[in-house]
Image: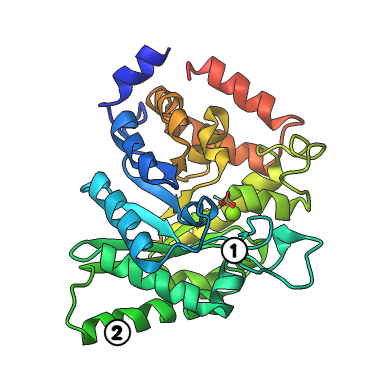
Amino acid sequence: RRAAYAALRALPPVTKDGQRITLMVNAGLRDDAAALDLTGADGIGLFRTEFQFLVSATLPQRERQQRLYRDVLEAAGDRPVVFRTVDIGGDKALPYMRSDENGEENPAMGWRALRVALERNGLMKAQARALLEAAAGRTLNVMFPMVSEPWEFDEAKRLFEAQRDWITSRHRALPTQIRYGSMLEVPALAECLDLLLPKLDFLSIGTNDLTQFLFAADRAHPKLAERYDWLSPAILRFLRRVAVPAKEKGVPVTICGEMGGRTLEAMALLGLGIERLSITPIAVGPVKAMVRSLDLAKLKPEMERWLSEPPPNMRKALTEWAQAHGV
Ligand code: PEP
Ligand code: MG
């Protein structure tokens, strides 16, 4: 099987009925960029910049951040890299940074990600400059984690634009283009999509956090981790509810949670009309094989029907459909 996946490396992820799917990889460390060549992926759809912070004994200074970002961009060449600003705090606490003085009972819902970054904005300013300077002469794709309300996106973007202006005033090289995106992993944001979408260059749905917040079930709790299925109608309907208006507004939507790296789940996502996945590198082979054996035009009406009238077991229904259709 591994040999079969390796043979797929040079082949594009195109469905049987000719739909080109975008398959990217999730990454976080310098060496992860090698996964692009190993898998033949279309780019890095999620670069988790907090990894550098988590593996460091001390706060990585701007120069160190910049070096990492430049190395990753260079390894990626023409392929896009989407950098996510730090998602630290909460359960990703840094030993060298004091987090919430009062401790946190619910760290996943706590003082983390953009909530920290907008308040401790020295951290975010340094990161913005590191990213802007690392991407000089090319496109910078940047997105913000845990956006809960549209104004948080505005504020984060403003902070980047201020750094861009500062670099301009110093006559230093800038990215040729800066594309701003938001993660959608907090359900509340979906209620404000009409306000958010016009601001965005792209949207990336983080199904790991989204699932735990939708079901009010801790993603790390051993008793709950397997309890709620990614293929449950609640999740699939929610994703469709986000993907449809985004598509109408011309905002590209990517799924970057672990869900997209499972072949059956990935098939369901394509059936919902989501055409961009950023997944763990080892999943690229199996997911690409699925894509190339799928008649998407046949699946879509079936998904539509299943979402209106969910079968008792969605996973079973999808599995049987896949088997019957040679996927
Ligand atoms: C997610 O929440 O789905 C996501 C991609 O972000 P992380 O797993 O880093 O929280
Ligand atoms: Mg997340």
Q: Position of residue 271 (x, y in %)?
A: 51, 38
Q: Is mark 1 within 8 Å of ligand 1?
A: no
Let me know if residue 91 appears in the view: yes
Amino acid type, residue under disc 1 in the picture = Tyr
- Which residue corresponds to the image point at 58% horizontal and 37% vertical from the top-left? 303
Q: Is mark 2 within 8 Å of ligand 1?
A: no
Amino acid type, residue under disc 2 in the picture = Trp
> For this view, does 185 lie left or right of residue 9?
right
User: Disc 2 designates what residue?
Assistant: 166
Q: Is residue 319 above or below residue 99?
A: above
User: Disc 1 designates what residue?
Assistant: 96
Quick one: SS at disc 1? Answer: loop
Q: Position of residue 157 (x, y in %)?
A: 43, 76
Q: Position of residue 240 (x, y in %)?
A: 57, 50
Crowding at mark 1 (Cα within 10 Å: few <14, some 14-19, many 20+): few
Crowding at mark 2 (Cα within 10 Å: few <14, some 14-19, many 20+): few
Quick one: SS at disc 2? Answer: helix
> For this view, does 46 lie left or right of residue 208?
left
